[in-house]
């Protein structure tokens, strides 16, 4: 017998090691071969059907189902920085307006006023309540006016001892705005962690469609506004209009018309270095309506008898 050709393995054990165990086995676990069915049989088709697989069945027609709710886009945040009289919105309650006057006070004058008010006003930290629990407000405040003022559940007692500098500032703001004010809420934001949350200045003691003048001194903070959603949105603020106004040293912002009815505003926390900011908010306070709980809202459904003079502004 002649020897096997070169390269042909004659040792069966060596061949099994090279080819692997599959080369020595036959049966259903082997890979596809000549003796196996490459397509499913009747039994496999019935098994597939029992699992809900219908590879050959397709619906005859397709019917488009519109979404139950229209898809809305989140509107971009608008930035107001330039001087101007802005109409924010038109609604059933009226027109909401902002008047922005950057540089209302010259820089050197603003510096001097800021340092005086920071050092000489009777700043204190008030306690307020949220869901029945007391908390310290993240800012300092003081109040001037012949009447007390209550917002949320925090009350400020009347104080007729106006600082002389505040009286001069009130006169300057009244000349620029054409409005008259009898009260002043002062806020001191000590750093970027001090803030005030979303709210509207719509307490009954402020009257119908109040006008509020905000004078800023110190470091710049962003004043944010968002439109109150309609009743059918059930308090969802996702798709409402939003505005940001950087209030710089010496700037004046006037909120008027239906702004307190249709919009909310806040000064949010900022997580980078911010110096102190003094904010003076001039307003007109009235006696609380009889039988009305102080610090709560009073919605006017008809024209108020004092609507033309309630805000203290010349129309």
Image (tube, helix red, strand yellow):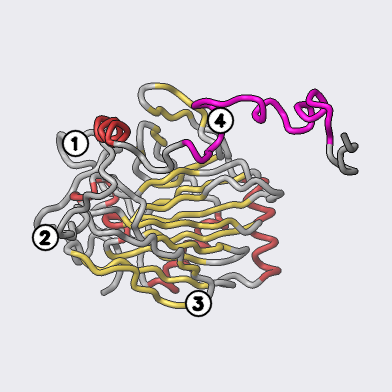
Mark 4, Cα crowd under 10 Å, few <14 / some 14-19 / many 20+, is: few
According to the picture, the residue beneath numbered tag 4 turns out to be: 30
Question: Could you say which disc has been placed on residue 292 in the image?
Answer: 1
Mark 3, Cα crowd under 10 Å, few <14 / some 14-19 / many 20+, is: some
Residue depicted at 36% across the width and 22% down the height:
132
Mark 1, Cα crowd under 10 Å, few <14 / some 14-19 / many 20+, is: few
Q: CA distance from mark 1 to mark 2?
A: 19 Å
Secondary structure of the residue carrying tag 4 is loop
According to the picture, the residue beneath numbered tag 2 turns out to be: 303
Mark earlier in primary sequence (4, 2) = 4
Residue depicted at 61% across the width and 48% down the height:
270
According to the picture, the residue beneath numbered tag 3 turns out to be: 83
Q: In the image, is residue 213 above or below residue 101?
A: above
Residue depicted at 68% across the width and 25% down the height:
21
Magenta span has 29?
yes
Mark earlier in primary sequence (1, 2) = 1
Image location (x, y in percent) of residue 89 = 29, 68
Secondary structure of the residue carrying tag 3 is loop
Q: CA distance from mark 3 to mark 2?
A: 32 Å
Mark earlier in primary sequence (1, 4) = 4
Q: Quadrant of residue 240?
A: bottom left
In this picture, which residue range is highlighted in magenta?
A: 9-35
């Amino acid at each position: 017998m002649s020897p096997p050709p070169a390269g042909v393995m004659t040792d069966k054990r060596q061949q099994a090691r090279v080819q692997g165990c599959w080369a020595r086995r036959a049966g259903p676990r082997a890979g596809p071969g000549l003796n196996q069915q490459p397509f499913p049989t009747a039994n496999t088709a019935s098994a597939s059907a029992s699992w809900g697989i219908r590879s050959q069945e397709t619906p005859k027609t397709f019917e488009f189902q519109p979404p139950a709710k229209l898809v809305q886009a989140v509107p971009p945040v608008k930035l107001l920085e330039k001087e101007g009289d802005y109409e924010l919105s038109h609604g059933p309650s009226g027109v909401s307006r902002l008047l922005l006057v950057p540089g209302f006070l010259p820089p050197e004058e603003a510096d001097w006023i800021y340092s005086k008010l920071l050092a000489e006003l009777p700043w204190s930290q008030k306690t307020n309540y949220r869901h029945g629990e007391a908390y310290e407000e993240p800012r300092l405040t003081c109040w001037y006016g012949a009447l007390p003022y209550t917002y949320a559940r925090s009350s400020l007692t009347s104080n007729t001892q106006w600082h002389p500098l505040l009286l001069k500032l009130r006169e300057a703001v009244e000349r620029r705005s054409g409005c008259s004010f009898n009260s002043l809420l002062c806020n001191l934001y000590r750093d970027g962690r001090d803030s005030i949350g979303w709210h509207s200045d719509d307490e009954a003691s402020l009257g119908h469609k109040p006008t509020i003048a905000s004078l800023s001194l110190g470091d710049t903070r962003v004043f944010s506004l968002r439109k109150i959603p309609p009743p059918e949105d059930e308090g969802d603020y996702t798709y409402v209009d939003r505005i940001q106004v950087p209030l710089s040293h010496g700037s004046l912002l006037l909120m008027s018309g239906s702004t307190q009815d249709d919009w909310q505003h806040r000064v949010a926390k900022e997580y980078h270095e911010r110096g102190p900011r003094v904010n003076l908010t001039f307003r007109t306070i009235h006696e609380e309506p009889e039988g009305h709980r102080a610090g709560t809202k009073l919605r006017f459904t008809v024209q108020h008898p004092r609507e033309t003079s309630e805000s203290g502004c010349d129309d």
